[in-house]
Amino acid sequence: MKITVSLIKADVGSLAGHHVVHEKQKELARKILQEAKETGLIIDYYVFNAGDDLELLMTHTKGVNNSDIHGLAWKVFKEVTDKVSKPLKLYAAGQDLLVEAFSGNLRGMGPGVAEMEFEERPSEPIVVFAADKTEPGAWNLPLFKIFADPFNTAGLVIDPRMHDGFDFVVMDVIENKEVKLRCPSEMYDLLALIGTPGRYVISRVYRHSDGEIAAVASTTRLSLIAGRYVGKDDPVLIVRAQHGFPAVGEILEAFAFPHLVAGWMRGSHHGPLMPVSLRNAKCTRFDGPPRVVALGFQVHEGYLEGPADLFDDPAFDWTRMRAMEIADYIRRHGPFMPHRLGPEEMEYTTLPAVLEKLKNRFVEAK
């Protein structure tokens, strides 16, 4: 029996600015998903948050892009918005719900979606990641390190089941096209693309030897859908671990370096991606810095055993301290690049309005 793991998220309102999901929002989400579990629509679920994003992790047997599963997630987000966020006047209620009515598939409607289908192995560990205050391209560097960098993942060298490498599907989010590249043979081509994370985003990773799915990431760019700034995309990611895939420790090792990502305050700044525990999945300083949580589960007959809060570990204290050093340094740049994003990423903010206002005051330089 094939099992599908669906991770679907949306910002449907937050307590005290773009800060954290209200507990009443999670309570209602759990109630709706429990009813779906009792009717047999889903096998199991887990509700959590990353900053101000409500995260729905569900298992079922209906495959990816299933309208019933996507409809269930839409129902959760709409009811949480209408019954909790709006009555409590939570900030930015329903922010990621860019359309009024569900049309059969959540892609292009605002919420972020990562789904994979597989036959369960004798032991099926997965790691679920959720980030806040950043964009889908934030996964590019960690995914490359996990599945292509032998200095991060020793198994690429010493595990025969991984020695043939992995295939990366890279999506051009501007042109809505994708290309599959094999590593290590096409590593330089891959890096040429994913080094531009605002446009080229890793969406899926497959084991080359047998085409088995290894990882899947959300690729939603909210500003491209809405045509205006409506918040950063806050991506999600699912990675399979062990037994022919990178070990959990190798997967987490890719986040030991708090690399710079786009997002942070008003989605308009670069900042370090800081790995945190669930209890610290709240964005405060300058609405950040960008956060990522990692939850470990064992999947058995579709049920979710866990989670293990994988970044709730002093082994990542140094990473968090380094992230805050980077945050402090780059914050001192204020409105100047490289702290502020480049003009191509600012086109959905107030910058076009400023240029429009001043256009008649520009004269030929003497």
Image (cartoon, helix red, strand yellow):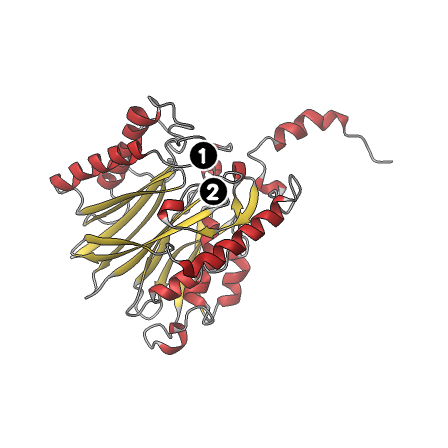
Q: Which badge, 2 or 1, comes first in the chain's sequence?
A: 1
Amino acid marked by disc 1:
His
Q: Secondary structure at mark 1?
A: loop
Quadrant of the drawing holding the C terminus:
top right
The Cα–Cα distance between marks 2 and 1, rounded to whole angstroms, is: 9 Å
On the question of residue 102 being in view, the answer is no
Residue 346 drawn at (x, y percent): 59, 38
Quadrant of the drawing holding the N terminus:
bottom left
Query: Which class describes the residues within 10 Å of circle 2: few (<14), some (14-19), or many (20+)?
Result: many
Left or right of residue 354, residue 218 in this image: left
Amino acid marked by disc 2:
Lys
Tell me whether circle 2 and circle 1 mark residues in contact (CB < 8 Å): yes
Total numbered labels placed on residues in the image: 2
- Please tell me which residue lies in front, 199 or 137: 137
Residue 256 drawn at (x, y percent): 46, 60
Q: Residue at 47% across / 35% down in the picture?
A: 231
- Quarter residue 282 falls in: top left
Q: Residue at 47% across / 51% down in the picture?
A: 274
Eye-nearest disc, 2 or 1? 1
- Quarter residue 246 falls in: bottom left
What is the number of the mark on residue 133?
A: 2
Left or right of residue 339, residue 255 in this image: left
What is the number of the mark on residue 18?
A: 1
On the question of residue 229 being in view, the answer is yes
Query: Which class describes the residues within 10 Å of circle 1: few (<14), some (14-19), or many (20+)?
Result: many
Residue 244 drawn at (x, y percent): 30, 70
Farthest residue to the left: give it: 39
- Please tell me which residue lies in front, 3 or 266: 266
Left or right of residue 301, residue 181 in this image: right
Residue 217 drawn at (x, y percent): 38, 51
